[in-house]
Image (spheres, rainbow, N blue to C red):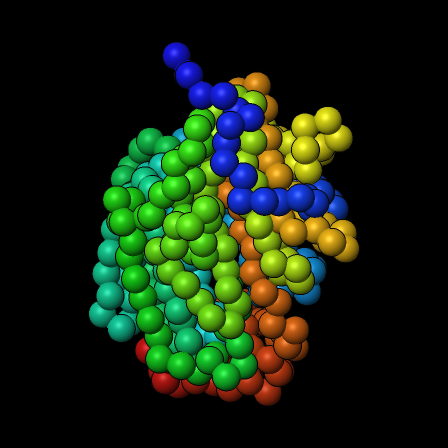
Amino acid sequence: MNTFTPTETPTPGVTHSRGVERLVQGQATSDGAGVRLTRLLTQDLQRRLDPFLMLDLFGTDNPGDYIGGFPDHPHRGFETITYMLQGRMRHRDSAGNEGLLVPGSVQWMTAGRGVIHSEMPEQEDGAMEGFQLWLNLPAGAKMREPWYRDVSSAEVPEWHGPGADVRVIAGHSHGVAGAVQREHTEPLYLDLHLQPGVRFEQPLPAGHHAFLVVYRGSLSVGGAASGTVVRPRRMAILDEPSGSDGVVLEAGVDGVRAILVAGRPLKEPIAQYGPFVMNTQQEIFQAVEDFRAGRLA
Ligand code: FE
């Protein structure tokens, strides 16, 4: 029995909430060796959601949809953040890193000048569910040395309020510092678990691009009465009315689980060819050449 009173949730002072600019259904696609997924942040949204380049949601209990995994492939010029909800995935890369992603854990990989890695399911049946987000690097950091961290589920900092459990993967929420911080893009990455009817407020700096994805239940954005309702497997791009200082979310009757992501745009040119994201076409040619010549690993 829940004893909380939703109106007593401490408020960090969001007075003017952002709303929903657009709901995105995403595109069913497959990647790696036939892994079926939903691409919610597609290439046409890269400028709108700068510094974020891609967001995939994978979620299935059919092994045929994931068993092929993602065999060896390269990356250069950005960071990948994988957040597992269900299932087990083994990661290995050319820098000698290896890790096992399990439910609730996060893998943060900075590809920098280059990494070749594989991400393979370590199960033959059962459900596999999670997110992979691509975060851009500023021009001056695209060729930095690769970096990698596995964050176990127990290591993900959490904030607990009445009816609210918030996992802080990156950035800050209600005084809790997330597992990873980044200075140029200042990413915020929260996993929200809210009981039915609970309100949650998150300050967001003006100018930062923000979106959320519901994966269980539903929520409304911008205040209960007038809020836009977001349902599972939908991405809501948040607008930024002048004077807004954050976002107010309210869980629906079944509660909600959702990720909330925001970051400071880099406002730099984006040149992408598959797993390489640089600033110019010349840098892309160089990346392809370096990969072919075995200089990426
Ligand atoms: Fe990858």
Q: Residue at horizontal 57%, vertical 50%?
A: 203
The image shows a total of numbered marks equal to 0
Rendered location of residue 121, percent (x, y): 32, 46
The vertical placement of 166 against 205, above or below, is above
Q: Residue at horizontal 39%, vertical 50%?
A: 176
Q: Quadrant of residue 3?
A: top left
Rendered location of residue 226, percent (x, y): 75, 30
Asked if one can make out residue 216 in the rendered structure from this viewpoint, the answer is no
The vertical placement of 117 against 260, above or below, is below
Asked if one can make out residue 193 in the rendered structure from this viewpoint, the answer is yes
In this view, the residue in front, 1 or 75, is 1
Q: Residue at horizontal 77%, vertical 55%?
A: 242
The vertical placement of 131 against 226, above or below, is below
- Side of 164 where 145 appears, left or right: left
Quadrant of the image containing the N terminus:
top left
Quadrant of the image containing the C terminus:
bottom left
Rendered location of residue 154, percent (x, y): 26, 44
Q: From this viewpoint, which residue is outermost toward the top?
A: 1
- Side of 113 where 200 appears, left or right: right
In this view, the residue in front, 70 or 207, is 207
Q: Residue at horizontal 24%, vertical 66%?
A: 97
In this view, the residue in front, 82 or 289, is 82
- Side of 205 where 296 appears, left or right: left
In this view, the residue in front, 177 or 184, is 177
- Side of 160 where 247 appears, left or right: right
